[in-house]
Amino acid sequence: MRLHLMSWPEVEAYLETSKGVIVPLGSTEQHGPTGLMGTDCICPEIIATRAGDKAGILVGPTFPVGSAQHHMAFPGSMTLRPSTFIAALCDWIHSLAHHGFTRVLVLNGHGGNVASVQAAFSEVYADFSLKRRGADEASLRCLLVNWWELKGVMQLCRQLFPVGHGSHATPSEVAVTYFAFPEAIKSATLEPKIAPEGPILDAADYRRRFPDGRIGSDPSLATPELGEKLVACAVKGLIETYERFRVAD
Ligand SMILES: [Zn+2]
């Protein structure tokens, strides 16, 4: 049920049966010495794809680069400035709305994206309110869901990783990526075992406070087996959330 693996007649046929779509939203940024650059894309993508296959929900292409200026002191990290990000996401959503999608669920993988996504939704709604869209176009609802906030996921994270979960390069997100791509599992000595905590400011400050990129976490606890459990829990939660959203007034 992935848009980029469908033909246009298949998308047209899907639209006859449903106006809903899930868009995974990621970021390309460092995730410590053992985490993958694509962690924040891979997590929402595997959860959305599995939920889509199970429940017959169309999954749009993953939006791959987000708001990650604070990771730019680490090689490979990429970022969009907020204004670019908001504009691009607006067009992404408007493109889907143009074809008749009226329920767009954005499944987010990166905490730093939240403010810009909400701003993009406000822009999209303003376009409708100010009649910048075609007058006959059905109105649109957008919903932002952070995958770690899906029902049961945080509870499972706390249960699986009572110590060293932290907030960046967490064992839960790393476990999900190791389940998705076991061939990409990394190993490195993590020193200290649990990374320091602190505020997030600019890129140079981030590297000074968090020299290996992790915040408060011990991703050496991550295994593909634990990732599989997290994905199963998140898929269930996503299907429930999506169904509520799809039928909501
Ligand atoms: Zn992440």
Image (cartoon, grey):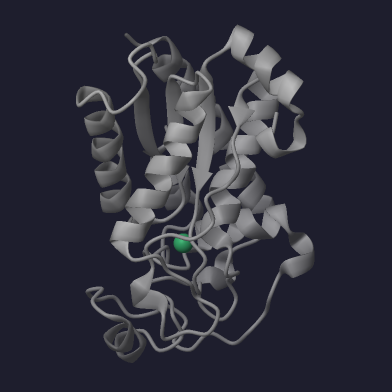
Looking at the rendering, in which quadrant would you find the C terminus? Answer: top left
Q: Is residue 181 above or below residue 34?
A: above
Q: Is residue 219 left or right of residue 81?
A: right
Counting from the top left corner in percent of width and height, residue 133 is at: 34, 25
Counting from the top left corner in percent of width and height, residue 103 is at: 43, 22
Q: Does the rendering let one see residue 112?
A: no
The residue sitting at 45% across, 15% down in the picture is 246
Q: Is residue 205 left or right of residue 10?
A: left
Looking at the rendering, in which quadrant would you find the N terminus? Answer: top right
The residue sitting at 75% across, 19% down in the picture is 9
Counting from the top left corner in percent of width and height, residue 237 is at: 49, 29
Q: How many marks?
A: 0
Q: Is residue 80 above or below residue 41?
A: below
The residue sitting at 40% across, 89% down in the picture is 211
Q: Does the rendering let one see residue 35?
A: yes
Quarter of image, res 5: top right
The residue sitting at 60% across, 14% down in the picture is 15
Q: Is residue 14 above or below residue 157?
A: above
